[in-house]
Amino acid sequence: MVRVEFLGPIQKDAMEFEITNLSELAPILQQDQELKEWLSNSAVAVNDALVASLEHPLKDGDKISLLPPVCGG
């Protein structure tokens, strides 16, 4: 089971899934209309390390963070 957390302005509670890589997660999250708008421009971290490949392997207990772009002063 992996845990998916949504940071910043994404107002969603954490979710848990039985998946083995990020490519399995993408279509699940795209079904949620509120999340869909964030997916194309958000960074993804696995266990606090940024990843670029949807083929990144996942194991039980991993934490996935969806990091939307933010601006600050």
Image: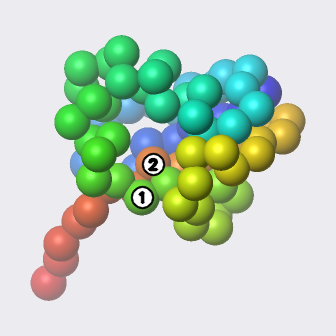
Q: Is residue 44 left or right of residue 38?
A: right
The residue depicted at 57 percent of the width and 45 percent of the height is 54
Choose between 71 and 42: the one closer to the eye: 42
Q: Quick check: marks 1 and 2 in contact, CB under 8 Å?
A: yes
Question: Which residue reaches farthest left?
Answer: 73
Choose between 73 and 49: the one closer to the eye: 49
Question: Which residue reaches farthest bottom?
Answer: 73
Residue located beneath label 1 in the image? 43
Question: Which residue reaches farthest right?
Answer: 60
Using the rendered image of the protein, determine whether residue 16 is visible from the camera's viewpoint. yes
The residue depicted at 44 percent of the width and 43 percent of the height is 6
Q: Sequence-wise, which precedes: disc 1 or disc 2?
A: 1
Instruction: Describe the element under mark 1 as helix, strand or loop.
Output: strand
Indicate the quadrant containing the N terminus: top left, top right, bottom left or bottom right. Answer: top right
Residue located beneath label 2 in the image? 66
Quadrant hosting residue 24:
top right
